[in-house]
Image (cartoon, rainbow, N blue to C red):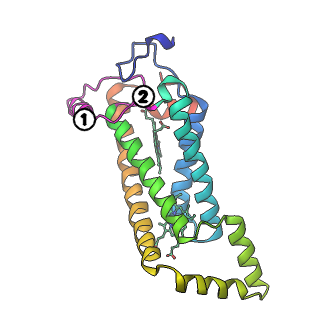
Amino acid sequence: MRQHIESGAHAAPGAVPPWDPVVRLTHWSLAAAVLANALLTKPGATIHVWIGWAAMAVLALRLLWGVIGPREARFASFLPDPRGALSHLVDLLRGRPQDHASHNPAGALMAYALWACLAVVIGTGLVMTDGKSPLTISEENAAVAAGDWSVLVAKDRADDHDDEGAGEIAEEVHEVVANLMLILAVIHVAGVAVESRALGRNLVRGMVAGRRR
Ligand code: HEM
Ligand code: HEM
């Protein structure tokens, strides 16, 4: 079946492969982590940092999978192609989008944009927390709760030496890019709905159950 699938090519009828379990698992875990941290957890709380670190591991797995995974999961099958994305959108507006073996070029750009936003949000999160693991943060919080203020004093001193501006910029970028990512996610879901309608097949089912037809 794989031999029908060409890089970025239109899918031959019946030859559309399922999304493999790693793509499906990483997709839904990243979506859940982003939504939880953007909408549910207290910003900066230990659980927020735990979820952020988990998202970092999952993102790393998906990026590795983009190099070593099956063909339709590999970046080579959905390289960034802005012209292709534009013509796909024009075709979609006309109600005649072409089917693709991997992500369509517009969906591919969106996937890269979402991953890039997530990487920036994680990176700025690490800057704000001085790269401390959530385990260290919860131990420090427990120490403070037990009356040991030396942790806070040490942190205060470190902040004094720190380039304060960098922390503030990281915080600002973290917030702005997290919100941008949410806006992109809404457009992404709308795109999935419109594309599913135009193609006459439910793309969400493919991401849930692995069946794309
Ligand atoms: C914050 C939330 C979300 C993020 C960050 C996100 C991100 C992504 C990314 C990065 C991809 C590419 C997948 C890969 O190659 O590994 C993708 C694909 C996909 N997403 Fe999401 N997503 C989110 C929410 C959703 C939701 C709520 C739905 C369903 C309603 C959905 C449905 C899909 C589908 C169906 C695809 C595959 C499209 C195709 O067949 O080409 N996503 N998403
Ligand atoms: C999964 C992706 C993440 C999302 C969507 C996210 C989202 C957010 C949002 C919306 C805020 C509130 C910003 C504000 O109003 O100032 C916030 C704050 C914060 N986030 Fe994240 N975050 C994520 C990952 C992380 C990670 C990985 C870390 C640390 C390693 C982190 C650490 C923090 C901290 C310390 C704050 C508090 C900033 C302050 O002092 O106001 N976040 N995050």
The residue nearer to you, when weighing 89 against 132, is 132
In the picture, residue 82 is in which quadrant?
top left
Task: Check the image and name the residue furthest to the right.
Answer: 146
SS state under label 1: helix
In the picture, residue 52 is in which quadrant?
bottom right
Q: In this view, does 188 lie to the left or right of 96?
A: right
Q: Inspect the magenta stretch and tell me whether residue 98 lies in it.
A: yes
The residue nearer to you, when weighing 38 against 204, is 38
Q: Do the residues labelled 2 and 1 touch (CB within 8 Å)?
A: no
Task: Check the image and name the residue furthest to the front.
Answer: 161
Q: Is residue 2 above or below residue 172?
A: above
List x then y, in percent, for residue 8: 36, 24
Q: In this view, does 147 lie above or below 104?
A: below
Q: Identify which residue is drawn at 62% across, 82% down.
A: 155
SS state under label 2: helix
Q: How many labels does the image show?
A: 2
In the picture, residue 144 is in which quadrant?
bottom right
Indicate which disc residue 89 carries: 1
Residue range of the region highlighted in magenta in the rendering: 75-104
Mark 1 is surrounded, within 10 Å at the Cα level, by few (under 14), some (14 to 19) or many (20 or more) other residues, namely many
List x then y, in percent, for residue 30: 54, 48
Give the foreground label among 2 and 1: 2
Q: What residue type is disc 2 on?
A: Ala
Q: Inspect the magenta stretch and tell me whether residue 115 lies in it.
A: no
The residue nearer to you, when weighing 78 against 42, is 78
Q: What residue type is disc 1 on?
A: Leu
Look at mark 2 in the image and give the residue it sits on: 76
Calculate the distance from the C-alpha at mark 2 to the C-alpha at mark 1. 21 Å
List x then y, in percent, for residue 72: 47, 25
